[in-house]
Image (tube, helix red, strand yellow):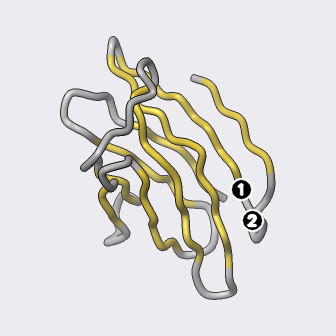
């Protein structure tokens, strides 16, 4: 697993994480988190870690909540979060589950 994080909550947070499960891999990145007092928006792109091809229709969500979205045709997503530490997951048929912690 490779993770590179620059920034902090309330500023632009850029994150790239490659997560692999067997021969399959999902990549989050780049992503940014823009925070306000009441909510935060996580944006990013989901792509295949090997081919770097955008993945359309992947589910990006926070487990145990109703916070969920799907990636667009170009693999990008926008997810509203509650401020604080959140685990974000990405699922797509044929790939392992991508997991990352956003602060």
In the displayed structure, does residue 27 sit left or right of residue 72?
Answer: right
Residue 41 badge = none
Q: Quadrant of the N terminus?
A: top right
Q: Which residue is mark 1?
A: 13
Q: Which residue is mark 2?
A: 9
| Quadrant of res 93 | top left
Secondary element under disc 2, as helix, strand or loop, is: loop
In the displayed structure, does residue 1 sit left or right of residue 59?
Answer: right
Q: Is residue 55 above or below residue 37?
A: above
Query: In percent of the image, x 63 and y 68: which residue is there?
Result: 84
Secondary element under disc 1, as helix, strand or loop, is: loop
Query: In percent of the image, x 54 and y 75: which residue is there?
Result: 82
| Quadrant of res 30 | top right
Query: In percent of the image, x 79 and y 59: which residue is there?
Result: 8
Structural distance between the alpha carbons of marks 2 and 1: 7 Å
At which x and y percent is residue 60?
37, 54
User: Which of labels 2 and 1 is toward the front?
Assistant: 1
Few, some or many residues within 10 Å of mark 1 (<14, 14–19, 20+): many
| Quadrant of res 25 | top left
In the displayed structure, does residue 93 sit left or right of residue 95?
Answer: left
Q: Is residue 64 above or below residue 30?
A: below
Front residue of 84 and 8: 8
Q: Is residue 44 above or below residue 82?
A: above
Few, some or many residues within 10 Å of mark 2 (<14, 14–19, 20+): some
Q: Residue furthest top?
A: 23
Front residue of 63 and 26: 26
Marks 2/1 in contact by CB < 8 Å: the verdict is: yes
At which x and y percent is residue 95?
28, 28
Q: Residue furthest front?
A: 74
At which x and y percent is residue 94?
21, 27
At which x and y percent is residue 69?
33, 63
Q: Disc count in the image? A: 2
């Amino acid at each position: 697993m490779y993770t590179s994080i620059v920034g902090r909550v309330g500023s632009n947070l850029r994150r790239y994480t490659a997560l692999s499960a067997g021969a399959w891999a999902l990549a989050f990145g780049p992503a940014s988190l823009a925070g306000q007092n009441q909510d935060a928006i996580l944006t990013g792109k989901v792509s295949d870690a090997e081919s770097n091809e955008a993945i359309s229709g992947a589910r990006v969500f926070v487990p145990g909540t109703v916070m969920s979205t799907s990636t667009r045709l170009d693999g990008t997503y926008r997810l509203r979060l509650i401020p604080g530490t959140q685990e974000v997951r990405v699922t797509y048929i044929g790939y392992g589950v991508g997991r990352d912690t956003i602060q």
